[in-house]
């Protein structure tokens, strides 16, 4: 006899809005028609939901849940049971003084939008939840300090990129690698290209894959401190290089630090951010990458008249944001989810409490994350580093996440944006600008990236990641093609050629900054489950930087 059908419907608009992948709970509903074989249908529902990193909120009352048991073993979540489980969680994990608080928080977590119906809340707690509901950007100073520091971590990447952009105009002459139309130097061009590309190669093939052990043994903060120290020393080393081989070595090590940092900072930011504004706060990564690009261009312009040492100052100035990150990171609390993952549940709650405006909000978010983490553990296989890395490809749910993250990371690089980030000054110079004019045109490119990225802070949690990407890619294709075709115009004065090239590069940059630019790291930081986040993000960063190297 044919089995009764299982229909799974998904509110896709909600999935692309304010919830991060770990908190997209209840956005998937299931309808089971007929009596059929219930166990097999529930198993199918579980596989489908976990494949999307979405599970039915097990804290909701049974009457509000369309399937009784996504994981196959979840108990009916009556009000009394929810309170009992939450209080037991607090008592069993070194937080007996907060047992009643977690009980009330669990009731709120069943349906956060209906907190006003939870009669057990105190007036102070009700006021705090109401204020959070109407002021989604409200948060304690420590939250904004931590997010701001992550933003500085993003700026280091942009500054490292643009330091070499300006230096490309002069360091080849220093080491006899320059090439002109009159005196072509193919070997020199290859060496300059390799020096620019090596940071991406080592970031993707080495830095990204040491993320898991570094995070495991040092924590998020320790890993960020170590990589920030690396990115403080290597720009200074680049500035003091006496040969192209020395410059190559410094940038080789710099790439390792960039890869390890790039895989951790977005995770750290996502794990601290409240779900209502997670998209916007994690978006600070891209905003501050482009801010770092702009500041790097500013530094290039400031030191352009310092003579033969200009390129050394342009490369060396990239130590500034890294030094700030290195000093400031230990004033941040450790990631609550990292502490949870490593069994330090009481410390995790204390960390969460520093990142939320009120204990009831901290307890709600922390217990909610714990419930999701338990669901993720049911899909985990355990094992060592290589087993966990293999799981990124072997487990269907994680493989799908890996596919999505890899796709957006490849798209970010292969759209060509980093050709402009690395070589805009050289492109503008070859189009007819002087060296100074090329630096100022590149400064305009950096400024446009910053300005065009700001609206995405408000759009990414309302329009969704996928929508922004699909809307902006056609514009990117058109404007980049137009910029390339403009270079074929050899008739007339140089000014007639330069204007269209600059215009279309700027329009391409605007489209990139509204879509693919901010979405890639944002999506990749969210899509993997907590138990597999380091390995998944490491692979995504590997893909991003490896394809960046090919450019």
Image (cartoon, rainbow, N blue to C red):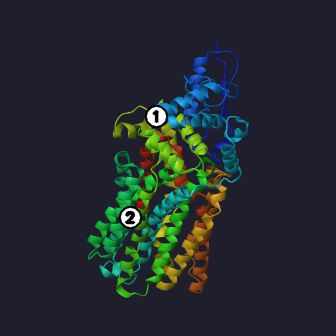
Whole-percent x, y for residue 169 in the image: 41, 79
Whole-percent x, y for residue 420 in the image: 50, 69
The disc, 2 or 1, on the residue closer to the chain's N-terminal end is 1
**Residue 507 quadrant:** bottom right
> Does 341 sit above or below residue 73?
below
519 and 274: which one is in front? 274
Residue furthest to the top: 1
Viewport quadrant of the N terminus: top right
Whole-percent x, y for residue 141 in the image: 56, 58
Residue at the (45%, 48%) spot, across then down: 537
Can see residue 527?
Answer: yes
Residue at the (52%, 72%) spot, across then down: 294
498 and 62: which one is in front? 62
SS of the residue under disc 1: loop
**Residue 179 quadrant:** bottom left
SS of the residue under disc 2: helix
Q: Residues within 10 Å of mark 2 (few under 14, many from 20)?
A: many
| 316 to the left or right of 135 | left
Residue at the (60%, 43%) spot, across then down: 360
Q: Residues within 10 Å of mark 1 (few under 14, many from 20)?
A: few
Residue furthest to the right: 117
219 and 141: which one is in front? 141
Q: Which mark is residue 197?
A: 2
> Does 242 sit above or below residue 128?
below
Q: Pointer 2 and pointer 1: residues touching (CB < 8 Å)?
A: no
In front of the other: label 2 or label 1? 1
Q: CA distance from mark 2 to mark 1?
A: 48 Å
Q: Which residue is mark 1?
A: 93
| 421 to the left or right of 238 | right
Whole-percent x, y for residue 201 in the image: 37, 58
């Amino acid at each position: 006899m044919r089995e009764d059908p299982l229909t799974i419907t998904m509110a896709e608009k909600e999935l692309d809005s304010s919830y991060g992948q770990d908190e997209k709970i209840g956005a998937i509903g299931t309808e089971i028609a007929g009596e059929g074989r219930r166990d097999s249908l529930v198993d199918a529902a579980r596989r489908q939901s976990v494949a999307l990193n979405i599970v039915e909120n097990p804290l909701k009352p049974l009457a509000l849940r369309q399937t009784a048991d996504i994981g196959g073993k979840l108990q009916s979540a009556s009000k009394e049971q929810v309170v009992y489980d939450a209080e037991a969680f607090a008592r069993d994990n070194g937080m007996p003084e907060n047992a009643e608080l977690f009980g009330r928080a669990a009731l709120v977590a069943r349906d956060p939008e209906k907190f006003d119906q939870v009669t057990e809340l105190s007036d102070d707690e009700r006021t705090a939840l109401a204020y959070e509901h109407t002021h989604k950007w409200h948060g304690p100073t420590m939250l904004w300090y931590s997010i701001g520091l992550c933003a500085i971590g993003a700026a280091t990447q942009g500054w490292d990129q643009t330091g070499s952009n300006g230096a490309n105009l002069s360091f080849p002459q220093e080491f006899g690698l320059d090439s002109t139309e009159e005196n072509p130097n193919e070997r020199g061009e290859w060496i300059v290209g390799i020096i620019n590309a090596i940071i991406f190669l080592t970031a993707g093939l080495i830095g990204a894959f040491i993320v898991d052990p570094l995070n495991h043994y040092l924590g998020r903060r320790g890993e960020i401190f170590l990589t920030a120290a690396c990115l403080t020393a290597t720009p200074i080393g680049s500035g003091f290089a006496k040969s192209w081989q020395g410059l190559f070595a410094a940038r080789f090590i710099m790439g390792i630090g960039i890869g390890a940092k790039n895989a951790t900072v977005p995770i750290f930011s996502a794990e601290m951010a409240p779900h209502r504004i997670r998209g916007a706060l994690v978006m600070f990564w891209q905003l501050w990458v482009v801010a770092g690009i702009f500041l790097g261009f500013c530094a290039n312009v400031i030191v352009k008249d310092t003579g033969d040492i200009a390129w050394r100052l342009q490369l060396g100035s990239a130590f500034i944001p890294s030094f700030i990150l290195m000093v400031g990171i230990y004033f941040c609390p450790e990631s609550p989810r990292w502490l949870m993952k490593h069994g330090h549940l009481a410390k995790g709650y204390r960390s969460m409490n520093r990142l939320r405006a009120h204990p009831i909000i901290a307890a709600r978010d922390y217990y909610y994350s714990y419930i999701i983490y338990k669901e993720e553990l049911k899909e985990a296989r355990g094992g060592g580093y290589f087993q966990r890395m293999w799981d990124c490809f072997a487990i269907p749910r994680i493989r799908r996440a890996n596919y999505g993250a890899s796709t957006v990371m490849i798209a970010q690089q292969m759209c060509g944006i980093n050709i402009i980030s690395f070589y805009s000054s050289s492109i503008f110079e070859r189009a007819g600008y002087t060296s100074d004019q090329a630096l100022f045109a590149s400064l305009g490119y950096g400024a446009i990236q910053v300005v065009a990225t700001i609206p995405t802070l408000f759009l990414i949690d309302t329009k969704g990641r996928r929508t922004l990407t699909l809307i902006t890619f056609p514009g990117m294709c058109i404007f980049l093609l137009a910029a390339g075709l403009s270079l074929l115009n050899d008739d007339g004065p140089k000014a007639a050629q330069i204007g269209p090239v600059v215009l279309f590069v700027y329009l391409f940059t605007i489209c990139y900054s509204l879509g693919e630019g901010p979405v890639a790291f944002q999506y990749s930081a969210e899509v993997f489950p907590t138990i597999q986040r380091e390995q998944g993000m490491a692979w995504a960063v590997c893909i991003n930087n490896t394809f960046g190297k090919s450019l």
